[in-house]
Amino acid sequence: MLKDITIGQYFPGNSPVHRMDPRVKLVLTMAFIVMLFMSSSFYGLLVGIVYTFMAFAASRIPFKMMFKSLKPIIPIIIFTAILNILFVRTGDVLWQLGFIRITQQGIHTAVFMVVRIVCLIVGTSLLTYTSSPIELTDAIERLLSPLKKLKVPVHELAMMMTIALRFIPTLIEETDKIMSAQKARGADMETGSIIKRARALIPILIPLFVSSFRRAEELALAMECRCYHGGEGRTRMKQMKTSAVDYVSIVITAAFIGAVVVINILV
């Protein structure tokens, strides 16, 4: 399961999405999130689904990565669906046993939320799939640059956010190695009660914390050895600039958002 987590991974390529300005990709990702939460019906979500598939097709990333990114959040999806089914009590009652009541509106809301979460995870994962950590750092810094006038350490914030995102796959790999080592020593993490399984995680968490602090110290030492002093006086080897692909993507995204607005008005 841990190996299926692809958050923070970057897949090099030369697709139109890879060639987009990372600043535009960040803004369009935010617009995509707004579009999903604006949708008040399945017709609006259908627009989001079409947009997601179009973006994945344009990125030329294998569609199996879409399903791979969903595997780790399957428990969250199931839990969300169960909560909506059990606690949404409006609409026609389809089945009832004691205080448990399943209604038509509950099932409708559960399916709606599941589809929204799936689109949200799959669509936003394209940002890290098609953008390197350096590109994301520069994009975040440029977008937040107006805050520099308020003495906000924009460069440091962007660097911390990107490093945290980049180290997710590294920590996942480290966790997998520690779990394999503990299982080789006879640790049982898959059987027993919930309390027993929670206690079995202690031999994993302690080495993971130690490894994380060690990696952070090594990274800080490496940055100091390279005379890193923050964003002051720094230059960039690759300057970000918009192209025709960015403008076309903005127009397409605006058209999809407009379609969602029209659907919300008409439906």
Image (cartoon, rainbow, N blue to C red):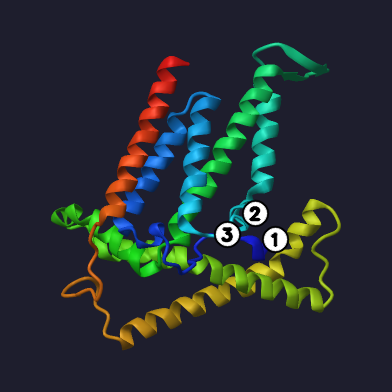
Which amino acid is tagged 2?
Pro
Q: Furthest residue to the left? A: 149
As shown in the figure, which amino acid type bears the numbered disc 3?
Pro
Frontmost of labels 1 and 3 is 3
Rendered residue at 22%/70% (across/down):
231
Q: Amino acid at mark 1?
A: Met
Q: Position of residue 19 (x, y in %)?
A: 35, 62
Q: Judging from the image, what secondary structure is the residue with disc 1 in?
A: loop
Q: Which mark is residue 1?
A: 1
Decide: few, some or many residues near mark 1? Use Cα within 10 Å; few <14, some 14-19, many ≥20.
few
Q: Quadrant of the N terminus?
A: bottom right
Residue identifier under label 2: 72
Q: Does residue 87 appear in this view?
A: no
- Classify mark 2: helix, strand or loop: helix
The answer to whether the residue labelled 1 contacts the one labelled 3, judged by CB atoms less than 8 Å apart, is no
Residue behind mark 3: 62
Residue 191: x and y, percent? Answer: 85, 59
Q: Which residue, as the protein is rendered here, is positioned at the far bottom?
A: 225
Front residue of this view, candidates 99 and 40: 40
